[in-house]
Image (spheres, helix red, strand yellow):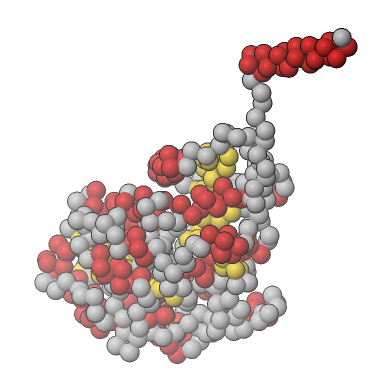
Amino acid sequence: MKLKRTLLLGALLLVSVLILSACTGIAPQAAAPSAGGEQVAAGEPVTITWAFWGSPEEAASHKIVADAFMAEHPEIKIEIWNQPWNDYFTKIQALWASGDSKVIPDVAFLWPTPRYAAEGVLENLDPFIEASGYDLNDYWPGLLESAKYEGSVYGFPRDIEVNVIYYNKDMFDAAGVAYPTDDWTWDDFLAAAEALTQKDANGMTTVYALAAEGGKWAKWVNQNNGAILDDYVNPSKCMLTDPASVGGVQFFADLMDQGYAMRPADLSQAGGDAAVFSSGQAAMILQNTSRVSAFNAAGMNYDVVPPPIPADGKRHNGAGGAAWVMSSGSDNKDAAWTFIQWLQSDGGGETIYTERGEIFPALQSVANSPAFMTDQPPANKQGIITEAAASDVGNFGYFPEWGELDGSIIGPGLEKIWAGEIDPETGLADICAQVDQFLADNGYPK
């Protein structure tokens, strides 16, 4: 009898549990933590924060990218953290300094990568690259160097700054100057510049052949086989007093002194290179592909060509670009890696940004795909690819203190040369003396 009662009570208890479960549902078990630290309830997406700078228009473009990713990866939700350029770096450093993983962005857009990697706020991507078999060979030559620190990859540049010559075909036609070719030289450029430049009765230039930002100077130096530093990762001395380096700076300075090129200060005051090119104040500009969309929208009759090189020089394009990085304090590293891989893929983010005309892609496969090789101007897209293929180190340093060195010594010294206040040889000697002292003070070479 006792046994029967026990069995009956057990059966009733089991029935009660089953009825309760049917009415209320049984809470799902939490998933085991992943390698990146996520612990997500089954069926619920992982949420990662994506940080970048930019205008509302740029943010709208990034949202299109985020929506496309989430459509392909419903297991991951992207939350956007967007700030204006002037506030972005101060605010993101404050988030990292807080140490609070709830507010630290999982993925961020950043420049320069080595500086922040040295501060320990970025995740070393080498283990993720190795585990996933992610292909690094699709990047343009030298490009990943700008996102490395102590030999490891800490970010993937979204694009690469390929500086080419934009030329106004109507102005060339009016001056009777033949359109430039992909193999033109400095001598060819000077001949065209003389014919395109217009001056008034007092010898003052009214229409310039070239408008180029002062920051483009390293292009001329490297084309002339010169250099800024003896080593761009672990420098020991300044190379700007080398005759080849002086010659590159002299070429750029002479264009200004002869009235062929606008001085950078005047260019800035006139509204920048896009403004003077669109208004016919300059027949050519030296710039990256960021101007294409605006010139196409304005219906300009223009094309592009690789910059001219000296007779005994070489083609050169600086390898660098702002990169997507992962925060070392992220709790969602696996999801962040999935997103970064997709951002930097043919068919993913790289393709979307390229199709929208916002970047020249970091990946060679995308640059050679229909996403970039469209029927829209400029016609000579192959010239851009030719210049990108010559990418290499040489435009800036890949070490944490480069920003300080350039901003406090190199940049201000060059501004005096561009303004015509000092000749290149004297100015560069003064710059190099200060650079060498800076490197010594900071323990270089290490």
Lateral position of residue 341 relative to residue 193, left or right: right
| Looking at the image, residue 161 lies above or below residue 309 | above
Residue 435 falls in which quadrant of the image? Answer: bottom right
Q: Pick whichever, 39 or 208, lies toward us.
A: 39
Residue under the point 41% across and 62% down: 362
Residue under the point 67% across and 43% down: 32
Q: Pick whichever, 397 or 434, lies toward us.
A: 397
Residue under the point 56% across and 56% down: 325
Quadrant for the N terminus in the image: top right
Lateral position of residue 201 relative to residue 103, left or right: left
Lateral position of residue 215 relative to residue 42, left or right: left
| Looking at the image, residue 113 lies above or below residue 3 | below
Q: Pick whichever, 132 or 96, lies toward us.
A: 132
Q: What percent of the width, then of the height, locates residue 334?
A: 59, 50
**Residue 107 seen in this snapshot:** no
- Outermost residue to the right: 2
Total labels drawn = 0
Q: What percent of the width, then of the height, locates residue 248?
A: 40, 82
Q: What percent of the width, then of the height, locates residue 160?
A: 41, 64
- Outermost residue to the front: 1
Quadrant for the C terminus in the image: bottom right
**Residue 294 seen in this snapshot:** yes
| Looking at the image, residue 147 lies above or below residue 79 | below
Residue 182 falls in which quadrant of the image? Answer: bottom left
Q: What percent of the width, then of the height, locates residue 155?
A: 54, 60
Lateral position of residue 30 relative to residue 44, left or right: right
